[in-house]
Image: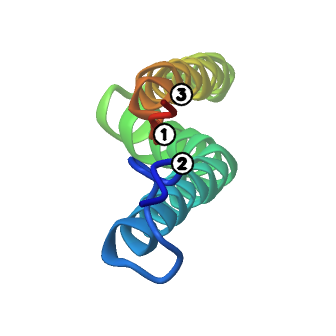
Amino acid sequence: MDVTNLGKPLLGTAAAISAGTEGDSHLSITAKALTTLSLLLIFLPITLYFFAKSLVFEGLFLLSSRQSYIYSAILAVVTVHVLLAGFLLFAFYEGGRTVYVSYKRD
């Protein structure tokens, strides 16, 4: 009896297939998160800037144009920082999900 392959999944078995798909799904989750963050970093600050400037600061609070530019810019910068902090937290906690496959050798 050959004992050198004990603990190793055989090629084509369910264990070998599930080990491969776990890594692929992990990569897929990371790629989706990175794509989502990139789109949010592009569109959310710009949208918030113009929305806050015209509707909130000039429309609701009746601030001058110069003041609304400043407050809207501050809001856009804070939005970028919040998104980057969220990405860093996601990346930090995502690193803990590493899939380890152990092989026992006797």
**Which circle's residue, 1 or 3, is located before the other in the chain?**
3
Give the SS element for disc 1: loop
Mark toward the viewer: 2 or 1: 2
Front residue (pair 49, 81): 81
Classify 10 Å Cα crowding around label 1: few (below 14), some (14-19), many (20 and above): few
Q: Quadrant of the N terminus?
A: bottom left
Name the quadrant containing residue 61: top left
Classify 10 Å Cα crowding around label 2: few (below 14), some (14-19), many (20 and above): few
Give the SS element for disc 2: loop
Horizontal side, residue 12 vs residue 41: left or right: left
In the rendered image, residue 63, in percent from the top left (x then y), is placed at 47, 22
In the rendered structure, are the residues bearing label 2 and label 1 in contact, judged by CB atoms less than 8 Å apart?
no
Q: Say which residue appears at 35% left-offset and 66% top-offset.
A: 15
On residue 49, the disc is none
- What's the distance in space between the residues labelled 2 and 3, CA to CA? 38 Å
Mark toward the viewer: 2 or 3: 2
In the rendered structure, are the residues bearing label 1 and label 3 in contact, judged by CB atoms less than 8 Å apart?
no
Q: Mark 2 = which residue?
A: 4
Front residue (pair 41, 15): 15
Query: Could you tell me the amino acid type at mark 2?
Result: Thr
On residue 91, the disc is 3
Name the quadrant containing residue 16: bottom left
Classify 10 Å Cα crowding around label 3: few (below 14), some (14-19), many (20 and above): some
- What's the distance in space between the residues labelled 2 and 1, CA to CA? 11 Å
Q: Mark 1 = which residue?
A: 103
Q: Say which residue appears at 43% left-offset and 62% top-offset.
A: 9
Query: Could you tell me the amino acid type at mark 3?
Result: Ala
Q: Say which residue appears at 62% left-offset and 55% top-offset.
A: 43
